[in-house]
Amino acid sequence: MFSQLREDIDCIHQRDPAARSRIEILTCYPGLHAILVHRLAHGLWRRGWLWAGRFTSHLGRILTGIEIHPGAQIGKRVFIDHGFGVVIGETAVVGDDCTIYQGVTLGGTRLYKGEKRHPTLEEGVVVGAGAQILGGFTVGAHARIGSNAVVIKPVPAGATAVGNPARVILKEDEHPTREPLPPQAPTEAPGQATDDAPLPCQTDWTAKPLQDLLQRGHPNNERPAGEATEFAAYAVDRRDDDPLIKVLHELIDHAASQEKRITRLCKAMEDLGQRVENGQKPLDAERLNRMVE
């Protein structure tokens, strides 16, 4: 009993940078108190003292703001950080070394008794604040659930789930590399100006202003060399995890490629004697900022 309590305190001291001492953790961390109360309630529940287990769990909810059904199975070294508003259902299973932040729900979507209604978290799972994991499926070992994600299907081991409904990002896709755009063959007629010559229809549009805007919201995009990756606070530690950012970059590259092709088409038409008028002004960063605002 005391060795397990020591493990719980040590894991909190290791994971939480706000923890100053072990006596502070023992006396001031509601997540630890909720785990201790649950162990007592779960022991009563397993012995068939259902009302006593449920009442003990209810007292723990009043004291900590964390509701854990006495039938739930909680592993070793589970860290519930802050914890207020956490709800863990009856058939939920939380593996060893999991981390759960405030406002998390491990709930169900079915109301049938005697079946597995709540999720299973394998070891090392990190669940961000406000996330909801609903259903009797499994979240694989060392997976990460982003803040405010709504997960309604299994998550593979080592993957990240973000968004509502959650989109699963596999580990090998976390650092995608976009291939450069293929070079376009010049289309000017012999003896005419090259691609570098200014034309009336040329807009000088590039993808850089939009990319600068995307980067501006994430000044710490690059991870310093040698930084540990074992524990990710609030479950998401890189902007590469956001599928929306990936799609935006792909759209920007595609738009830049199409603009180049249109410019060459305008040049080819002018070479044939057809003047192409273009009243569009170049799309610079300042004009783009005004459009976004």
Image (tube, grey):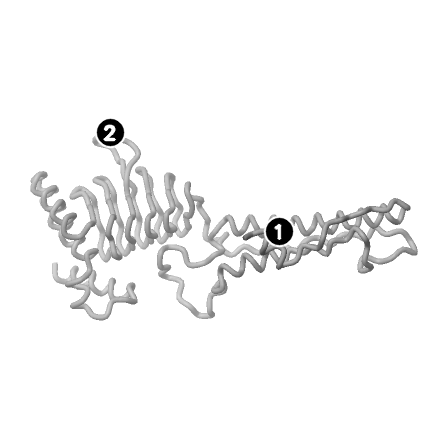
Q: Which quadrant of the structure image shows residue 198? A: bottom right
- Callout 2 amino acid: Tyr
The picture places residue 190, in percent across and down from the top left corner, at: 91, 54
Q: Which mark is residue 191?
A: none
Residue 69, placed above or below residue 101? above
The picture places residue 217, in percent across and down from the top left corner, at: 49, 59
Q: Local crowd at mark 2 within 10 Å, few (<14), some, or many (≥20)? A: few
* Residue closer to the observer: 173 or 19: 19
Q: CA distance from mark 1 to mark 2?
A: 48 Å
Q: Which mark is residue 252?
A: 1
The residue positioned 44% from the left and 70% from the top of the image is 226
Q: Look at the numbered disc 1 and give the secondary structure of its residue.
A: helix
The residue positioned 59% from the left and 51% from the top of the image is 291
Residue at the outermost right position: 191
The picture places residue 274, in percent across and down from the top left corner, at: 88, 44
Q: Local crowd at mark 1 within 10 Å, few (<14), some, or many (≥20)? A: some
Q: Between disc 1 and disc 2, whose residue precedes?
A: 2
Residue at the outermost top position: 112
* Residue closer to the observer: 1 or 269: 269
Left or right: 206 with respect to 53?
A: right
- Callout 1 amino acid: Ile
- Quarter in which the N terminus is drawn: bottom left
The picture places residue 188, in percent across and down from the top left corner, at: 86, 52
| Residue placed under numbered mark 2 in the picture | 112
